[in-house]
């Protein structure tokens, strides 16, 4: 399991890392997001999405992904957004698929499926 601290350490090594805290006015800090922010392989890819357990299943994760997608939409050459999702118990596959992501058939790190969404899909404007 990756923590925000590990992600920030990685961001210090990888210049393509774009990191943001996820803050909700009524709740404070609820999570963290990190994006692979470059056209170079693997392209624009949601690298980390961490939502504190206390705040899960409240829509904050979906809102964060939509915000990241809107940011990516304005980036050079951006056509789609990718994400990696591990398989097995606790997998986020269903979460990402509910947002419009589809499996590409690509596998990274042996157990992580790559999913993708076209940035022109209408789900980005949804609630």
Image (spheres, rainbow, N blue to C red):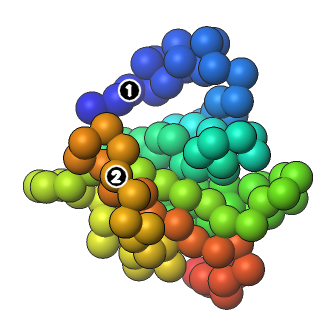
- Residue labelled with disc 1: 3
How many other residues sit within 10 Å of disc 1, few (<14), some (14-19) or many (≥20)? few
In the displayed structure, 19 sits above or below 96; it is above
Tally of numbered discs = 2
In the displayed structure, 97 sits above or below 56; it is below
Mark 1 lies on a secondary structure that is loop
Q: Nearer the viewer, residue 34 or 29?
A: 34
Q: Quadrant of the C terminus?
A: bottom right
Say which residue appears at 55% left-offset and 48% top-offset.
46
Q: Quadrant of the N terminus?
A: top left
Q: Position of residue 80 (x, y in %)?
A: 67, 65
Q: Position of residue 29 (x, y in %)?
A: 53, 39
In the displayed structure, 3 sits above or below 71; it is above
Q: Is residue 90 left or right of residue 73?
A: left
- Residue labelled with disc 2: 107
Query: Are discs 1 and 2 less than 8 Å apart at CB?
Result: no
Whether residue 66 is visible: yes
User: Residue extending furthest bottom?
Assistant: 122
Q: Where, by quadrant of the figure, is residue 79 drawn? A: bottom right
In the displayed structure, 79 sits above or below 123; it is above
Say which residue appears at 47% left-offset and 41% top-offset.
48
């Amino acid at each position: 399991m990756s923590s925000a601290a590990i992600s920030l350490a990685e961001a210090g090594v990888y210049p393509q890392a774009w990191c943001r805290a996820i803050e909700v006015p009524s709740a404070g800090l609820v999570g963290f997001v990190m994006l692979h922010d470059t056209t170079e392989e693997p392209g624009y890819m949601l690298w980390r999405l961490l939502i504190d357990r206390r705040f899960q299943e409240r829509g904050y994760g979906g809102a964060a992904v939509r915000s990241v997608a809107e940011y990516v939409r304005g980036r050079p050459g951006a056509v789609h957004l990718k994400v990696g999702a591990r398989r097995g118990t606790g997998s986020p596959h269903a979460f990402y698929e509910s947002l419009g992501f589809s499996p590409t058939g690509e596998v990274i790190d042996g157990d992580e499926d790559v999913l993708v969404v076209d940035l022109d899909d209408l789900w980005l404007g949804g609630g």
